[in-house]
Image (tube, rainbow, N blue to C red):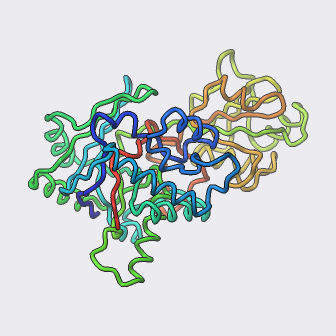
Amino acid sequence: MHVSPITCLRPLPEHVAEFAALPYDVFTDAEAREYVRKHPTSFLAIDRPETSFEEGHDPYAPEVYARASELLRERQLDRTLVRDEKPCFYIYEQSTQSHRQIGLMGAIAADDYADNTIRQHELTLSAKEEDRVRHIEAVRAQTGPVFLAYPDSEAINVILNAAMQGEPLYDFCTSDGVRQRVWRIAREVAVGALSVAFSTIDRAYIADGHHRAAAAVRICQKRRAEGRQDDPAEEFLGVLFPASQLQILAYDRVVRDTAGMTEDELLERIEAAGFSVTKAPDDTYRPANKGTFGMYAFGTWHLLTWGQGTNDLDVAVLQDNVLDPILGIEEPRSDARISFVGNGTKDELERLAGDAGMAFALFPTSIEELMAISDAGGLMPPKSTWFEPKLLSGLAIRRIW
């Protein structure tokens, strides 16, 4: 694959903790507005520019995208952001008490996406893709990085570990307890060594950011059609992590009703579909094994165990045997009756389900399952994986105009 150093806008160290923010798509509308109210100079204000307008304002109106451009310019004028004109790689480490992952931020060739060197595992929604295209065009830059995984490489590990012996450019903790550290790699010999090392990697996988990647590639194709050559849009901003370091947590489901069924009717239909159903032990809600599901309905948690083998993805088993045929949720990407919760707590899932709805706690998809399906050219059901920690956006903003 082709990975190149980047020039970028980046926050000064004294501003990074306030400016950098979680990706735009992990916030609900209300959550985004509340975050920006508390952090008006954060990157989320640029990433979700509709928060500058009254509730109910069309988030896709031209003036909304123009506001993103204005805010980015303001952050340059007040020196929150500075230009780093030397082509560099950036090492991005995230760590908690129980987990650590070390990635490389750089530019990935759009052609690697087109020829399946960069592999996908889910479909994109045209409206969300178009939103990111318009956002990139408005701010004239790639902002949120695409989160990618690659097969482990000892050669790359050695280079990164050596570069991390110096003082980091950034070192701060976010409110969720994740320590965020970034090192700048500017020495030409190290930059060259990393580019060569990644050229030996024959594939990588999008972990998070399918819409950001698709939007960046669309802009590349558009500018090629205009006859542009040696264009910065030929590459997109990404962070690459060794696959073995990544942590996938469960992506749970909440349904707002029980499709008109009583408790007895619901359990009877689930058993008829091929599950064994038992009442969950006290304080148990999260399944301990693949092929088992926690289900909350009518004020009680049950464990559902799939009786047809465990070769299929759990999210697919649930969708194909419960959500669609029993609850009538044929298209979870667009059905308003279903919502998705990353690694929900017991109390959170019960609260969201309420008295009338239900919740499903899943066993996490593995990185091996993701890679195998992507290698086979397959697609996962929507919301199959929840990676934590999430990458912060705003650490590097790559201008392409």
Q: Where does the image place residue 107, in percent across and percent down from the top left?
A: 30, 59
**For residue 14, above or below residue 89:** above
Badge count: 0
Furthest-top residue in this view: 282
Q: Where does the image place residue 387, in percent across and percent down from the top left?
A: 47, 41
Horizontal relation, residue 81 to residue 31: left or right: left
Q: In which quarter of the image is the C terminus?
A: bottom left
Q: Quadrant of the N terminus?
A: bottom left
Residue appearing at x 46%, y 27% in the figure: 176
Which of 254 and 176 lies nearest the eye of the viewer?
A: 176
Q: Where does the image place residue 388, in percent across and percent down from the top left?
A: 46, 37
Which of 244 and 96 lies nearest the eye of the viewer?
A: 96
Which of 357 and 74 lies nearest the eye of the viewer?
A: 74
Residue appearing at x 39%, y 54% in the figure: 73
**For residue 299, above or below residue 13:** above
Horizontal relation, residue 187 to residue 92: left or right: left
Which of 288 and 229 lies nearest the eye of the viewer?
A: 229
Furthest-left residue in this view: 189
Residue appearing at x 52%, y 41% in the figure: 386
Please say whether residue 373 is visible from this viewpoint.
yes
Q: Where does the image place residue 277, in percent across and percent down from the top left?
A: 75, 30
Residue appearing at x 44%, y 44% in the figure: 43
Horizontal relation, residue 104 to residue 302: left or right: left
In which image quadrant can residue 309 be found?
Answer: top right
Please say whether residue 242 is visible from this viewpoint.
no
**For residue 183, above or below residue 6:** above
**For residue 350, above or below residue 366:** above
